[in-house]
Amino acid sequence: MAPVNSAPRTIIALGLEGSANKLGVGIVKHVYASGIPSNAELLPEYIELANVRDTYNPPAGEGFLPRDVAAHHRSVIIPLLHMAFEEANITHEDLDCICYTKGPGMGAPLQSVALVARTLSQLWNVPLVGVNHCVGHIEMGRAITGADNPVVLYVSGGNTQVIAYSQQTYRIFGETLDIAIGNCLDRFARVLKLPNDPSPGYNIEQYAKRGSKFIELPYTVKGMDVSFSGILSFIEKLVKTEPGKYTPEDLCYSLQENMFAMLVEITERAMAHIGTSEVLVVGGVGCNMRLQEMMGQMAIERGGKVFATDMRYCIDNGIMIAQAGALAFARGFTTAIPDSWITQRFRTDQVHVEWRT
């Protein structure tokens, strides 16, 4: 396990994230006091230099269109870059790599951010690193919480996956068969005409805290997978066909309790399978305190612990892309300009996690 070079090594990475309605710019510094080891897991000292973000919010009751999100990202990315460099107190000459979200996500926003990353890479002569959005969430969660070998519950507007690490791959044990849990929450928020600021899911969470009457909804777990589209159709029908019978608070409370129970079930099954007592919750829906509470109750009953981050890190952000990209870069990975395309479909288990053993 001797280092390639025992001389201290520092990597400073710029991260650009814009796969959905959040545009994030982050800068991270990794310090390898004894050099970068060749045959051991990379565990650098993590130093956050900057983590800034701007969100596109459409009017209440409306979703966001890819073209509008892309236009937002194009309009704010230069000011955000200036803000990040000022916060980090560095210049582009200090960068070792520029990391961008290669996918998955919405095509037009991804393309807008990749274009900026590609341009900066060529202007500044700094290597480019394409990063899987999901792996970015996982590596950010590991860095912030210190979770060792957890089952990862990744829940967001575009993804719902139960993941565990094995043989340099984040392997998917279970996932949604249709829409993601965050997408389900967002669409129900539109039915109730809830604001999009700060996020539809956050506003549903606040309504749910005031709910007390549980309404029976479909509970759809199929092995290790879940399905949310039927639940959404069912609860939408309740609102439209029986107006006034149920309060928005009780509807939000019931929807959360039902779907979170499904996630707890499949996560616990994955924990039993791999023999771990740790759960790491990542992704935008991971900010939900009720989900963390329910997952925590399950983990405690198994003698374990749940790890989660706050809104700075669970919601899409640039530093998570910098974090994962810096680890890949330390292992020699870069993305050539002809290969710096984006893809809306990029599974978590397609990434070679070479920085772990």
Image (tube, helix red, strand yellow):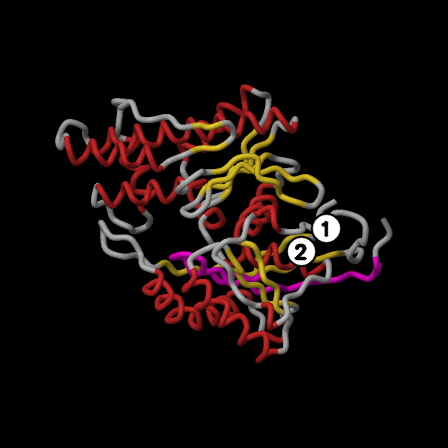
Q: Nearer the viewer, residue 260 or 52?
A: 260
- Residue 33 in picture, x, y percent from top left: 76, 56
The residue sitting at 44% across, 49% down in the picture is 315
Residue 327: mark:
2
Task: Spot the residue most to the right.
Answer: 2
Q: Earlier in the sequence, mark 1 or mark 2?
A: 1
- Residue 75 in picture, x, y percent from top left: 37, 71
- Residue 330 in picture, x, y percent from top left: 71, 59
Magenta-drawn stretch contains 13: yes
- Residue 241 in picture, x, y percent from top left: 15, 32
Q: In the picture shown, does residue 144 fall above or below 34?
A: above
Q: Is residue 199 rendered to the left or right of residue 193?
A: right
Name the secondary structure under disc 2: helix
Q: Are marks 1 and 2 in contact (CB under 8 Å)?
A: yes
Magenta residues span 4-27
Q: In the picture shown, does residue 15 fall above or below 211?
A: below
Amino acid at circle 1: Leu
Amino acid at circle 2: Leu
Q: In the picture shown, does residue 157 fall above or below 256?
A: below
The residue sitting at 55% across, 25% down in the picture is 269
Q: Nearer the viewer, residue 219 or 97?
A: 219
Residue behind mark 1: 42
Residue 85: mark:
none
